[in-house]
Image (cartoon, helix red, strand yellow):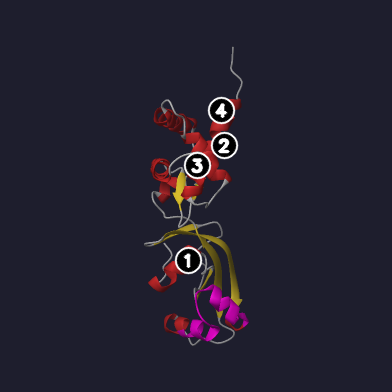
Amino acid sequence: MLLFKKRFHAGLVDGRVTRTFRVWEKPHVKVGGRYRVHPIGVVEVLAVSRVALGALTDTDARAGGFESKAELLDYMAPVAKAPLTDATGVFDVTLRHAGDGDRVSLALEDTLTKAEVLALQARLTKWDGRAPWTMTTLKLIKRRPRVAASKLAATLGRETLPFKADVVKLKKLGLTQSFEVGYEVSPRGVAFLKAAASLRRRPRVR
């Protein structure tokens, strides 16, 4: 978990807040890590560096959700263990909102056994029935991440609400993640698509 006060939540979700500055003795996050931010979902860390406080600018502060560097310093001072100076080292974390976090532990599992792949295929085949939609929907979301559901549905000639209901089914299997606008195929979903394609290419043994 990575803690943010409520004032930062909207900016994290809509992309206005892309950095956070922390007075840590050692880094508490790592590049590529995904951390829950209650109640807005998950953020993914894109970069981590340690910088001197004096090197930060108003532009840096605005990326962190502040009006100015002075406001950032006022915000950090109460949690610092010592008076802040230009030489004080802070961790500069670049991040992005990475979904609503539903079933996040499952969605982030990017290594699947053959048995798990076959079980997922069986579930999707059952859902497809006489009108296959599951793989088509997953591949469309992979090609067009974070595109509005209405536009994705129109691409398939479908109504928006039934399309969204079907994507929810995929999300419950950990294959997709929802965003403020649109969806992405989750790490688990990417692994499944890759494994399923590999199984289809494998020659039959006679």
Q: Read off the residue under disc 2.
A: 194
- Tag 4: amino acid: Leu
- Whether residues under marks 3 and 2 lie with C-beta atoms below 8 angstroms apart, the answer is no
- Front label number (4 vs 1): 1
The region drawn magenta spans 55-74
Residue 136 visible in the current orientation: yes
Label 4 neighbour load within 10 Å: few <14, some 14-19, many 20+: few
- Tag 3: amino acid: Gly
Label 2 neighbour load within 10 Å: few <14, some 14-19, many 20+: few
Vertical side of 175 occupied by 71: above or below? below
Q: Give the CA distance from mark 3 to mark 4.
A: 15 Å
Query: Could you tell me which quadrant the N terminus lies in?
Result: bottom left
Q: Read off the residue under disc 4.
A: 199
Question: Camera-side residue: 10 or 70?
Answer: 10
Q: Give the CA distance from mark 3 to mark 2.
A: 9 Å
Q: Give the CA distance from mark 2 to mark 1.
A: 30 Å
Nearest to N terminus: mark 3 or mark 2 = 3
Q: Read off the residue under disc 3.
A: 189
Question: Camera-side residue: 129 or 125?
Answer: 129
Vertical side of 49 occupied by 188: above or below? above
